[in-house]
Image: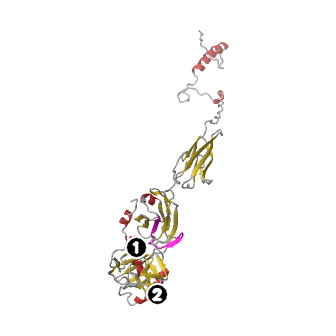
Amino acid sequence: MVAVRRWRRSAHTAWSATALVVCGVIATTALTACNPKTVADGSPSAGASQVSGADVPSATPAPTATPAPSSTPAAVALSPANGAANVSPVAPVTASVTGGKLTAVTVTNDAGKVVAGALDPTSASWKATEPLGYSRSYRMKADAVNDAGSLTTQTSSFTTLTPGNMTKVYLNTTGGQPLNQGGVYGVGIVVVAHFDEQITDRAAAEKALVVTTTPAVAGSWYWTDNSNAHWRPQNYYASGTKVSVKANVYGVKVGPGLYGETDSSVSFTIGAKHVSISDDKTKQVSVYFNDVLQRKMPTSMGKGGSQVVNGLTISYWTQPGTYTVIGQGNPVIMDSSTYGLPVNAKGGYREPIYWATRISTDGVYLHELDTTVWAQGSRDLSHGCLNLNQANAKWFYQHAQIGDVVKVINTGGSTLQVWQNGDWTVPWATWKAGSALS
């Protein structure tokens, strides 16, 4: 036991040697007891003395070990799988890797043609950028390396389907003429997708038919039969509208054993708005450009009534409805036998007609006929066409665009039918119901 004696400091605060020894023991004990205690978060506890960094040597960080490259081989997946048969030529052809990077991918058919493709920016996947061919064999080979540079190679061999039959799509006007790439058409132009085979899966075929417009307009396909689908907007196009039509049918099954042969596409522009109204009450054709009246033309339309010839009923009305311009000729040889009336029968004819603008598939034209000028504007004498004098017929012919609208009102006879070029006569709700996807 250490005896503790009481001491007094001198005026100079000096301690005796004995006291220093004793205090040295006491001081050591105090330092041990008064080291700062550390709380859970690593900071000194309240009331504890802080020890400066100068009093405690700093710890040297342990060097970070660089992980060794993985020796696990890169895993490569290919699609179609090895041995796949009857693969669709538009099915995805892909390669992907985990635990490494693709270094080379090739797909080659049995004729030695290499299929084009592209790697993604990370070299983790590859895909073909063009379709395959029908009735072909393919070999796919993909190389990949892991982090250690070890090479993995994967291969796949597969075959594509052989169609029982193929169909091609033609993009036409309702007059049966091809839509011209870069062409200009009237505000009532109707797109016809004509398949050269009977389509039993209309829904699959229609999904492959794509119409894009700028600006966007509401529109729909309407199937008139198993070979023809028509597309039009709900209302006339606005002038300047850009229209793109694509039939992406290649590789698409549209019936038992029936596949699309090749894709088709066309783009065109809508021209100035031309709408003509032929009113049988006034016997006048009023022509409007961009909703402004340009010309009024006296006319003589269908005389009305009908005639039975060889069991066929022939109507002489200019049927009411909304037509569009589908063709022109100067001259056109008009032959009554084309609609069932023999040339040598009463009222039959075969003769050249000038400045003729066609508006129906069954032969209704606006055309020159000077022999009826005396009746134009007052009396109907024709077999169904709209007779005009030479000056008016020529003017209309020279200003008409395929797709321009011609409305016939206040006449007798049955309403114009779709097959006659009466697409715009069909109410919109009925038109939409004619879609295979409605």
Quadrant of the snapshot with the N terminus? top right
Query: Is residue 129 found inside the magenta-colored segment of the image?
Result: no
Q: Which residues are magenta?
A: 180-196
At label 1, which amino acid type do we have?
Answer: Gln
Q: Residue furthest bottom?
A: 374
Q: Dot 2: within a 10 Å radius of its alpha carbon, few (fewer than 14), some, or many (20 or more) residues? A: few
Q: CA distance from mark 1 to mark 2?
A: 28 Å
- The local secondary structure at tag 1 comes to helix
Q: Is 137 above or below relative to 389? A: above
The foreground one among 344 and 161 is 344
Say whether disc 1 or disc 2 marks the residue closer to the N-terminus: 2
Q: Residue furthest top?
A: 1
Residue 128 in the image: x percent, y percent? Answer: 57, 52
Residue 368 in the image: x percent, y percent? Answer: 44, 85
The foreground one among 34 and 166 is 166
Which residue was labeled with disc 1?
A: 420
Q: Is 48 above or below relative to 404? A: above
Residue at position x 44%, y 62% in the image? 198
Which residue was labeled with disc 2?
A: 391
The foreground one among 17 and 320 is 320
Query: Is residue 186 found inside the magenta-colored segment of the image?
Result: yes
Tell me the number on the disc at residue 317.
Answer: none
